[in-house]
Amino acid sequence: MIKDILNNISLLCDSFPDQLRTITADQFCTKPLNKWSKKEILGHLVDSANVNIQRFIRGQIEDNPSIYYEQDEWVSVQGYQEYDDEKLITLWESLNRHLAYLVNRIPDTDLSRTCLMKNGEPRSLQYLVEDYLSHLQHHIRQITA
């Protein structure tokens, strides 16, 4: 299962940046009413990669670390709407390649270790890795729609 997830993330790293580059600047930055632009969704995916990298590291070496973030505030504070398009695409790709490398290094015996979610519920590293890919694919569909 983990190998399939790694393959999917790697394939996305190979293809998604080129898909992003075909989106016009207007389409990339248009903000629907009370929603994120495609560019801000990509920024959110950068944040998600950063947070999950921490989960996948700390989940292996700490007991039940509590790692979460306030996604709307993170997107706002980091100003992704004004971020350089190409740098944001490169950042997303680099973080996801690193995340895939990191996930590949998680020993099978550590996949059952847990992190605490915002609501205090424990989630295994296995679940978090699987959920990361689902979350990533969901937002990629939003961006490419």
Image: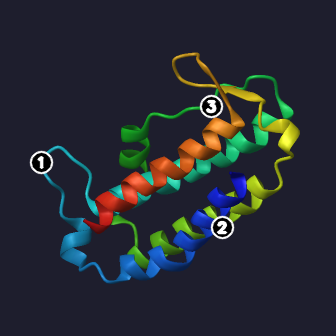
Whichever of callouts 2 and 1 sits on the residue coming sooner in the sequence is 1
Q: Residue at x 37, y 76 (%)?
A: 20
2 vs 59, nearest the viewer: 2
Q: Is residue 84 left or right of residue 87?
A: left
Image x and y of residue 45, in percent: 47, 54
Q: Which residue is mark 1?
A: 33
Neighbourhood count class around disc 2 (C-alpha, 10 Å): few under 14, some 14–19, many 20 upward:
some
The amino acid on which the numbered mark 2 sits, given as a three-letter code, is Arg
Of the pair 122 and 61, the residue shown nearer to us: 122
Q: Secondary structure at mark 3?
A: loop
Number of marks in the rendered image: 3
In the rendered structure, which amino acid carries the disc numbered 1? Answer: Leu
Q: Residue furthest left?
A: 33
Q: Are marks 3 and 1 in contact (CB under 8 Å)?
A: no
Q: Earlier in the sequence, mark 3 or mark 1?
A: 1
- Confirm whether residue 61 shows in the render: yes
> Horizontal and vertical percent for residue 106?
82, 48
Could you tell me which residue is drawn at 70 percent across and 37 percent down? 125
Question: Looking at the picture, how far across and down is residue 114, in whole percent?
Answer: 72, 27
Measure the C-alpha gap from mark 3 to mark 1: 30 Å
Residue at left 48%, top 49%?
A: 134
The answer to whether residue 81 is visible is no
Q: Which residue is mark 2?
A: 97
How far is disc 2 from disc 3 in space, using C-alphas? 21 Å
Give the vertical position of 119 relative to 48 (above or below). above
How far from the left and from the top, in percent, is residue 140? Answer: 39, 61
Task: Report the quarter where the C terminus lies.
Answer: bottom left
* Disc number placed over residue 67 in the picture, else none: 3
Provide the secondary structure element on which disc 2 rests. helix
